[in-house]
Image (spheres, grey):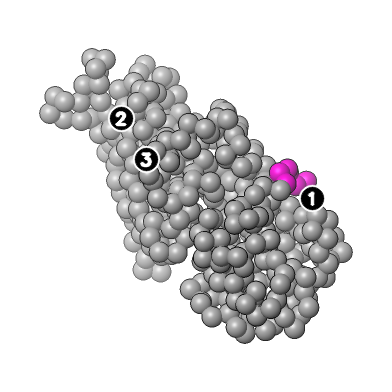
């Protein structure tokens, strides 16, 4: 409660400016206009668990900002990023949100990676009317409210958007592929008790049973666990032909390894939280045949993403661009394009303080452009209009796309 009170107080701060006019006579952009510096905040796990995908988010935004500055997408405006490490912890994410809200240069934020962290940040950003676009959150409640499964959808925060599709589609897409594509009939379902993992596992289980599949058992683990001996014993006794896991790669890469070492030679199937080269590097040969779903189509196959990938590799950036890097690039460009539209519609001048942040929220909601991952636009809940999903399987030590499509229920 103490934290929440502090957050709301900070979020209600009156901002005197968004963006800052560079001083000292060196802010001329070469066009005769002074340069205004605007910040796009980034929040993601940049160290520890989940950091491989978190760093992909940070550098996806960095490339978008560098491109915008090089091309002078918004004349007279220089963009920069402010990246904060949430360590995949909701409390840290909330503190970061408070810090970003209190920085008058910040006009929008890309992130976080984890849905549970997003839940702790949404109200903070909403209180300051600061736009937030996640490239990776998939829990449906974030945009459609807690009663979405009953058909009663209500958008909780108008400042929240995402470029990744939801688990309502990802869970169903995975269940359909497991039952019809892999011909699996009996599954053991595990989750990590987190907002993303538990939610995705629940949707998968319900959809798998609706298709006619059987659930031979369920269990939950804790994030950070290393020894899954007891879980392996339960899975072995359940005589399942597939394990479905809702959670991140940090734990699942150890689960599959310990399963195979115990002689349980069945594939592990998970969501986008498992989709990382780190999963294969850690699990080694035990990961062969394992399966995941992830948002969108494979970024390596998208012609529009070719330059982005070349830049990411040439810069030697850490982390992985393949999971959310492209979606982060597009999210940052939604904010950059909003600033461009606002300036062009205001006689070449940017409004300041609360007015600029409010207008950025409004313009992001109207986004309609071709990004490197496809069309970028949002529905009335702030969800992406891009509903594409892909199934990947570990083949010869690499993730290989085996099916791309959409899920219509």
Disc 2: CA contacts within 10 A as few (<14), some (14-19) or many (>=20): many
Q: Which badge, 3 or 2, comes first in the chain's sequence?
A: 2
Q: Which residue is drawn at 58% across and 79% down?
A: 228
Disc 1: CA contacts within 10 A as few (<14), some (14-19) or many (>=20): few
Q: Which badge, 1 or 3, comes first in the chain's sequence?
A: 3
Q: Which badge, 2 or 1, comes first in the chain's sequence?
A: 2
Q: Nearer the viewer, residue 319 or 156?
A: 319
Q: Which residue is drawn at 40% across and 50% down?
A: 318
Q: Is mark 3 on a helix, strand or loop?
A: helix
Q: Which mark is residue 315?
A: 3
Q: Residue 62 carries which label?
A: none
Q: Tell me residue 110's x, y (percent).
A: 44, 45
Asked if residue 359 can be seen in this view, the reply is no
Q: Is 24 left, or right, of 372 in this rendering? A: left
Q: Marks 3 and 1: in contact by CB < 8 Å?
A: no
Q: What element carries label 2?
A: strand
Q: Is 158 left, or right, of 68 in this rendering? A: right
Q: Tell me residue 372's x, y (percent).
A: 54, 33
Q: What residue is shown with label 2?
A: 78
Residue range (magenta): 403-409
Q: Is 35 left, or right, of 161 in this rendering? A: left
Q: Is mark 1 on a helix, strand or loop?
A: loop
Locate residue 303: give its quadrant: top right
> Which quadrant of the rendered structure holds the N terminus?
bottom left
């Amino acid at each position: 409660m103490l934290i929440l009170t502090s957050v709301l107080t900070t979020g209600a701060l009156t901002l005197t400016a968004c963006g800052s006019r560079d001083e000292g006579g060196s802010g001329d952009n070469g066009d005769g206009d002074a340069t205004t510096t605007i910040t796009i905040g980034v929040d993601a796990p940049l160290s520890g668990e989940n950091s491989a995908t978190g760093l992909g988010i940070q550098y996806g935004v960095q490339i978008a900002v560098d491109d915008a500055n090089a091309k002078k997408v918004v004349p007279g405006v220089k963009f920069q990023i402010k990246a904060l490490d949430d360590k995949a912890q909701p409390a840290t994410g909330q503190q970061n949100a408070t810090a970003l809200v209190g920085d008058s240069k910040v006009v929008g934020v890309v992130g976080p990676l984890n849905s549970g962290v997003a839940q702790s940040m949404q109200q903070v950003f909403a209180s300051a009317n600061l736009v937030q676009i996640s490239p990776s959150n998939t829990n449906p409640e974030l945009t459609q409210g807690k009663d979405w499964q009953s058909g009663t959808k209500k958008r909780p925060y108008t400042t929240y958007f995402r470029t990744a599709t939801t688990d309502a589609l990802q869970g169903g897409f995975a269940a359909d592929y497991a039952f019809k594509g892999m011909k699996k009939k009996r599954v053991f379902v595990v989750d990590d008790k987190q907002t993303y993992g538990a939610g995705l596992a629940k949707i998968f289980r319900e959809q798998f049973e609706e298709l006619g599949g059987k659930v031979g058992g369920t269990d939950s683990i804790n994030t950070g666990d290393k020894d899954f001996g007891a879980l392996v014993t339960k899975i072995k006794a359940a005589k399942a032909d597939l394990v479905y896991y809702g959670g991140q790669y940090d734990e699942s890469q150890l689960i599959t390894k310990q399963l195979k070492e115990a002689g349980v030679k069945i594939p592990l199937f998970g969501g986008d939280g498992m989709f990382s080269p780190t999963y294969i590097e850690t699990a080694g040969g035990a990961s062969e045949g394992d399966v995941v779903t992830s948002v969108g189509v494979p970024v390596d196959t998208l012609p529009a993403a070719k330059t982005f990938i070349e830049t990411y590799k040439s810069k030697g950036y850490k982390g992985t661009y393949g999971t959310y890097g492209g979606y982060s690039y597009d999210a940052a460009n939604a904010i950059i394009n909003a600033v461009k539209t606002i300036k062009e519609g205001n006689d070449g001048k940017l409004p300041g303080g609360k007015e600029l942040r409010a207008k950025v929220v409004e313009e992001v909601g109207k986004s309609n452009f071709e990004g490197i991952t496809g069309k970028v636009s949002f529905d009335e809940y702030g969800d992406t209009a891009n509903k594409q999903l892909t199934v990947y399987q570990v083949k010869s030590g690499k993730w290989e796309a085996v099916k791309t499509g959409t899920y219509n229920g």
